[in-house]
Amino acid sequence: MASSVSHLDPMPKVSIRAADDTVAAQALGLAFGSAEQRDDTLVVRIRPDEWILLGTGALALAAELDLSGYASTVDITHARHVIRVTGTHAADTLAKLCSADFDEAMTPNGAAWGNSIAGVTCDIVRDDHGGERSYLLLFDGSFVAYFLGVLEDAAGEFSSDS
Amino acid sequence: MLLVPCPNCGPRNAADLSYNGESHARPDPTTCTPEDWRTYLYLRDNPSGWLRESWYCSSGCRKHFTIERHTLTGELRTPILPGSKPGATKGETK
Protein backbone atom coordinates (compact mmCIF):
# COMPACT_ATOMS: atom_id res chain seq x y z
CA MET A 1 0.00 0.00 0.00
CA ALA A 2 1.48 3.34 -1.01
CA SER A 3 -0.19 5.52 1.58
CA SER A 4 -3.50 5.26 3.42
CA VAL A 5 -5.27 7.83 5.57
CA SER A 6 -7.64 6.62 8.29
CA HIS A 7 -9.61 8.49 10.93
CA LEU A 8 -9.29 6.58 14.24
CA ASP A 9 -11.85 8.31 16.45
CA PRO A 10 -13.32 7.91 18.93
CA MET A 11 -10.04 6.85 20.49
CA PRO A 12 -9.65 7.63 24.22
CA LYS A 13 -7.07 10.38 24.79
CA VAL A 14 -5.81 12.03 27.93
CA SER A 15 -3.50 15.01 28.27
CA ILE A 16 -1.33 15.10 31.38
CA ARG A 17 0.58 18.20 32.46
CA ALA A 18 3.15 17.64 35.17
CA ALA A 19 6.26 19.41 36.41
CA ASP A 20 9.53 17.48 36.43
CA ASP A 21 9.59 16.99 40.20
CA THR A 22 6.09 15.51 40.52
CA VAL A 23 5.23 11.88 41.18
CA ALA A 24 3.18 11.75 37.99
CA ALA A 25 6.14 12.87 35.86
CA GLN A 26 8.38 10.25 37.45
CA ALA A 27 5.77 7.55 36.86
CA LEU A 28 5.24 8.44 33.21
CA GLY A 29 8.93 8.93 32.45
CA LEU A 30 10.11 8.94 28.81
CA ALA A 31 12.42 11.44 27.17
CA PHE A 32 10.92 14.55 25.62
CA GLY A 33 9.98 13.77 22.04
CA SER A 34 9.48 10.03 22.40
CA ALA A 35 6.62 7.54 22.64
CA GLU A 36 6.26 4.06 24.10
CA GLN A 37 3.53 1.41 23.95
CA ARG A 38 2.49 0.23 27.45
CA ASP A 39 -0.09 -2.56 27.25
CA ASP A 40 -3.02 -1.05 25.36
CA THR A 41 -1.94 2.58 25.80
CA LEU A 42 0.52 4.62 23.77
CA VAL A 43 2.32 7.02 26.12
CA VAL A 44 3.73 10.09 24.35
CA ARG A 45 5.89 12.78 25.92
CA ILE A 46 4.97 15.45 23.45
CA ARG A 47 6.29 18.47 25.35
CA PRO A 48 8.75 18.87 28.23
CA ASP A 49 5.85 19.08 30.70
CA GLU A 50 3.07 17.31 28.82
CA TRP A 51 2.25 13.68 28.08
CA ILE A 52 -0.57 12.35 25.92
CA LEU A 53 -2.05 8.91 26.51
CA LEU A 54 -3.72 7.21 23.54
CA GLY A 55 -5.68 3.98 23.42
CA THR A 56 -8.30 2.02 25.26
CA GLY A 57 -6.34 2.04 28.53
CA ALA A 58 -5.66 5.79 28.55
CA LEU A 59 -8.36 6.80 31.02
CA ALA A 60 -7.53 3.97 33.43
CA LEU A 61 -3.81 4.76 33.33
CA ALA A 62 -4.49 8.45 33.97
CA ALA A 63 -6.78 7.62 36.89
CA GLU A 64 -3.98 5.67 38.57
CA LEU A 65 -1.57 8.63 38.56
CA ASP A 66 -0.70 10.50 41.75
CA LEU A 67 -1.55 14.12 40.90
CA SER A 68 0.05 15.73 43.92
CA GLY A 69 1.99 18.91 43.20
CA TYR A 70 1.79 20.66 39.85
CA ALA A 71 0.05 17.95 37.85
CA SER A 72 -3.29 17.60 36.13
CA THR A 73 -5.13 15.35 33.69
CA VAL A 74 -7.69 16.36 31.08
CA ASP A 75 -9.80 13.98 29.02
CA ILE A 76 -9.34 15.25 25.45
CA THR A 77 -11.07 12.32 23.74
CA HIS A 78 -13.62 14.53 22.02
CA ALA A 79 -11.55 17.71 21.75
CA ARG A 80 -8.78 16.31 19.61
CA HIS A 81 -8.91 13.82 16.77
CA VAL A 82 -6.42 11.24 15.53
CA ILE A 83 -5.62 10.36 11.94
CA ARG A 84 -3.23 7.56 11.01
CA VAL A 85 -1.18 7.81 7.83
CA THR A 86 0.34 4.45 6.91
CA GLY A 87 2.26 3.02 4.00
CA THR A 88 5.52 3.04 2.14
CA HIS A 89 4.84 6.62 1.05
CA ALA A 90 3.46 7.84 4.39
CA ALA A 91 6.49 10.07 4.97
CA ASP A 92 6.34 11.39 1.40
CA THR A 93 2.68 12.24 1.87
CA LEU A 94 3.36 14.24 5.03
CA ALA A 95 6.47 15.85 3.56
CA LYS A 96 4.25 17.49 0.94
CA LEU A 97 2.40 19.34 3.70
CA CYS A 98 4.92 19.77 6.48
CA SER A 99 8.42 21.21 6.95
CA ALA A 100 9.56 18.45 9.34
CA ASP A 101 12.40 16.11 8.43
CA PHE A 102 10.88 12.63 8.08
CA ASP A 103 14.22 10.92 7.48
CA GLU A 104 14.82 7.77 9.54
CA ALA A 105 17.80 9.40 11.27
CA MET A 106 15.80 12.40 12.47
CA THR A 107 12.42 10.84 13.28
CA PRO A 108 12.80 7.10 13.91
CA ASN A 109 9.97 4.87 15.11
CA GLY A 110 8.83 6.18 18.50
CA ALA A 111 9.65 9.82 17.77
CA ALA A 112 7.06 12.44 18.74
CA TRP A 113 7.00 16.14 18.05
CA GLY A 114 4.76 19.10 17.38
CA ASN A 115 4.56 20.64 13.93
CA SER A 116 2.30 22.43 11.51
CA ILE A 117 0.80 20.29 8.73
CA ALA A 118 -1.04 22.17 5.99
CA GLY A 119 -1.42 25.04 8.43
CA VAL A 120 -2.90 22.88 11.19
CA THR A 121 -0.93 22.61 14.42
CA CYS A 122 -0.50 18.89 15.08
CA ASP A 123 1.24 16.49 17.37
CA ILE A 124 2.95 13.82 15.29
CA VAL A 125 3.92 10.36 16.56
CA ARG A 126 5.88 7.86 14.48
CA ASP A 127 4.14 4.58 15.31
CA ASP A 128 5.11 1.89 12.81
CA HIS A 129 2.86 -1.14 12.41
CA GLY A 130 4.04 -4.50 11.10
CA GLY A 131 7.28 -3.04 9.83
CA GLU A 132 5.42 -0.45 7.77
CA ARG A 133 5.83 3.28 8.30
CA SER A 134 2.94 4.85 10.13
CA TYR A 135 2.27 8.23 11.71
CA LEU A 136 -0.40 9.30 14.17
CA LEU A 137 -1.53 12.91 13.81
CA LEU A 138 -3.36 14.59 16.72
CA PHE A 139 -5.11 17.85 16.07
CA ASP A 140 -8.08 19.97 17.14
CA GLY A 141 -11.37 18.39 16.13
CA SER A 142 -12.67 21.46 14.34
CA PHE A 143 -10.19 20.85 11.50
CA VAL A 144 -11.31 17.28 10.70
CA ALA A 145 -13.05 17.90 7.37
CA TYR A 146 -10.33 20.17 6.00
CA PHE A 147 -7.48 18.06 7.33
CA LEU A 148 -8.81 14.77 5.97
CA GLY A 149 -9.26 16.45 2.62
CA VAL A 150 -5.71 17.74 2.28
CA LEU A 151 -4.20 14.48 3.55
CA GLU A 152 -6.21 12.36 1.11
CA ASP A 153 -5.30 14.75 -1.68
CA ALA A 154 -1.60 14.47 -0.80
CA ALA A 155 -1.80 10.68 -0.47
CA GLY A 156 -3.54 10.47 -3.85
CA GLU A 157 -0.34 11.41 -5.63
CA PHE A 158 1.20 8.11 -4.58
CA SER A 159 -1.86 5.90 -5.15
CA SER A 160 -0.59 4.64 -8.52
CA ASP A 161 2.07 2.65 -6.67
CA SER A 162 -0.45 0.62 -4.69
CA MET B 1 13.83 29.92 5.18
CA LEU B 2 15.04 31.02 8.61
CA LEU B 3 16.03 28.14 10.91
CA VAL B 4 15.43 29.08 14.53
CA PRO B 5 17.16 26.87 17.14
CA CYS B 6 14.52 26.24 19.80
CA PRO B 7 16.21 25.23 23.10
CA ASN B 8 13.89 22.22 23.37
CA CYS B 9 13.13 21.19 19.80
CA GLY B 10 16.35 22.10 18.01
CA PRO B 11 16.42 23.91 14.65
CA ARG B 12 12.90 24.69 13.44
CA ASN B 13 11.41 26.51 10.48
CA ALA B 14 10.61 30.05 11.63
CA ALA B 15 7.08 29.52 10.32
CA ASP B 16 6.58 27.02 13.18
CA LEU B 17 7.29 29.74 15.76
CA SER B 18 5.84 33.11 16.67
CA TYR B 19 8.04 36.17 16.84
CA ASN B 20 7.38 38.32 19.89
CA GLY B 21 9.86 41.11 19.16
CA GLU B 22 12.73 42.59 21.12
CA SER B 23 13.26 41.18 24.57
CA HIS B 24 13.19 43.85 27.27
CA ALA B 25 13.54 43.73 31.01
CA ARG B 26 10.13 44.74 32.42
CA PRO B 27 10.42 47.68 34.83
CA ASP B 28 8.61 47.53 38.15
CA PRO B 29 5.26 49.25 37.44
CA THR B 30 4.95 50.36 41.08
CA THR B 31 8.21 52.30 41.11
CA CYS B 32 9.07 53.28 37.53
CA THR B 33 8.24 56.64 36.00
CA PRO B 34 5.62 57.03 33.24
CA GLU B 35 8.49 57.68 30.81
CA ASP B 36 10.18 54.41 31.77
CA TRP B 37 6.91 52.53 31.31
CA ARG B 38 6.21 54.19 27.96
CA THR B 39 9.74 53.34 26.81
CA TYR B 40 9.22 49.73 27.83
CA LEU B 41 5.89 49.50 26.00
CA TYR B 42 6.56 51.38 22.79
CA LEU B 43 10.22 52.15 22.09
CA ARG B 44 12.56 49.66 20.44
CA ASP B 45 16.33 49.79 20.01
CA ASN B 46 16.27 48.46 16.42
CA PRO B 47 20.07 48.07 16.28
CA SER B 48 22.17 47.21 13.27
CA GLY B 49 23.82 44.11 14.74
CA TRP B 50 23.02 41.67 17.51
CA LEU B 51 19.56 41.94 19.02
CA ARG B 52 18.03 39.90 21.86
CA GLU B 53 14.55 38.75 20.85
CA SER B 54 11.69 36.75 22.30
CA TRP B 55 10.19 33.83 20.34
CA TYR B 56 7.41 31.33 21.07
CA CYS B 57 7.65 27.75 19.83
CA SER B 58 3.96 27.60 18.94
CA SER B 59 3.98 24.38 16.90
CA GLY B 60 6.58 22.50 18.92
CA CYS B 61 7.22 22.58 22.66
CA ARG B 62 5.00 25.65 23.28
CA LYS B 63 7.65 27.42 25.32
CA HIS B 64 8.79 31.02 25.17
CA PHE B 65 12.52 31.62 24.86
CA THR B 66 14.97 34.37 24.01
CA ILE B 67 17.63 34.31 21.36
CA GLU B 68 20.17 36.66 19.83
CA ARG B 69 19.75 37.49 16.13
CA HIS B 70 22.06 39.54 13.95
CA THR B 71 19.80 41.95 12.12
CA LEU B 72 22.14 42.26 9.14
CA THR B 73 23.07 38.61 8.56
CA GLY B 74 20.11 36.77 10.13
CA GLU B 75 22.52 34.65 12.17
CA LEU B 76 21.01 33.25 15.39
CA ARG B 77 22.79 32.29 18.59
CA THR B 78 22.37 31.58 22.30
CA PRO B 79 18.76 30.44 22.69
CA ILE B 80 17.79 30.52 26.36
CA LEU B 81 14.70 29.31 28.17
CA PRO B 82 13.39 31.54 30.98
CA GLY B 83 15.31 30.76 34.15
CA SER B 84 18.10 28.97 32.30
CA LYS B 85 21.72 29.93 31.80
CA PRO B 86 23.35 30.35 28.37
CA GLY B 87 24.68 27.06 27.10
CA ALA B 88 22.12 24.93 28.93
CA THR B 89 20.25 24.20 25.71
CA LYS B 90 19.76 21.36 23.27
CA GLY B 91 19.49 23.51 20.15
CA GLU B 92 22.26 24.56 17.83
CA THR B 93 23.52 27.93 18.89
CA LYS B 94 24.96 29.28 15.67
Image: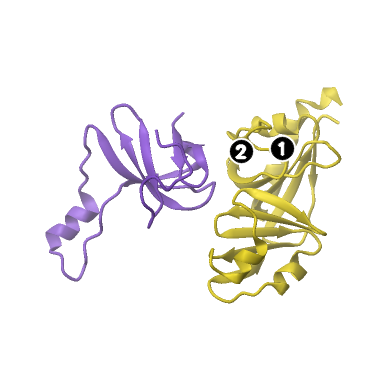
Determine whether B24 is above or below B2 in the image. Answer: below
Compared with residue B74, is residue A145 higher up or lower down, i.e. above or below?
below
Q: What is the display colour for chain B?
A: purple
- Circle number at residue A106: none
In the picture, the quarter occupied by the N terminus of chain A is top right
**Residue A125, visible in the rendered structure:** yes
Using a 10 Å C-alpha cutoff, classify the residue at mark 1 as few (fewer than 14 neighbours), some (14 to 19) or many (20 or more).
many
- Does residue B50 appear to the left or right of A148 in the view shown? left
Image quadrant in which you'd find residue A148: top right
Q: Please name the residue that numbered disc 1 is placed on.
A: A151
Q: Provide the chain ID for the residue under circle 2.
A: A
Residue at the limit of the structure toward the top, as seen here? A160
Q: x, y percentage for residue B59?
A: 54, 46
Where residue A158 sits in the image (x, y, percent)?
Answer: 78, 26
Q: Amino acid at mark 1?
A: Leu
Q: Are marks 2 and 1 in contact (CB under 8 Å)?
A: yes
**Residue hosting label 2:** A118
Q: Amino acid at mark 2?
A: Ala
Badge 2 crowding class, 10 Å Cα cut-off, few under 14, some 14 to 19, many 20 or more, is: some
Who comes first in sequence, dot 2 or dot 1?
A: 2
